[in-house]
Amino acid sequence: MAQAGPELPTWWDQYSERGLFPYGVSIMEGYDGAQAYWEGTLGVPSGEPGTVMPWAGDQTFSTGQFFPGPTVGTPAYIIVDLTTMEIVAIQEGYSGAEESLFTPYLR
């Protein structure tokens, strides 16, 4: 399984005060696998909500329902506008312009 997401902690640090709340999800992994990746590999600690970037393991791959086909290219991004709770963008894989997905929604 491919891992991705090293940009998420940076985005958290740069943009969380402006309303961007990255949430890292390791697909097809339970808590222990997700913890090993997010805390061990990327150094993203767990802690009080709102104090560190949140992460989770999606052991049942429920996030896959938002993408066509049986697999998802990683990284995959789902951008949700929290004021409306609507999905406003979905992307599979790196484009080099990921920040353009969420910058229109910053405060």
Image (spheres, grey):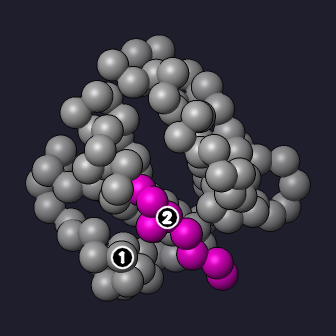
Instruction: Kindly identify which residue carries mark 1.
Output: 42
Q: Which mark is residue 5?
A: 2
The residue sitting at the top extreme is: 84
x 51%, y 21%: residue: 104
Q: Is residue 98 left or right of residue 8?
A: right
Is there any visible trace of residue 35 in the rendered image?
A: no
Q: Image height check: is 27 above or below 68?
A: below
Give percent across and percent down for residue 20.
Answer: 36, 35
Q: Give the camera-side residue of 24 and 101.
A: 101
Specify whether residue 3 is painted magenta. Answer: yes
Three-letter code for the amino acid on which mark 2 is drawn: Gly
Three-letter code for the amino acid on which mark 1 is drawn: Leu
x 49%, y 64%: residue: 5
The residue sitting at the front extreme is: 96
x 37%, y 49%: residue: 11
Give percent across and percent down for residue 23.
Answer: 40, 51
Helix or strand or loop: what does disc 1 sit on? loop
Occupied quadrant, residue 98: top right
Task: State the extent of the magenta-drawn residues as a range.
Answer: 1-8
Q: Pointer 2 and pointer 1: residues touching (CB < 8 Å)? A: yes
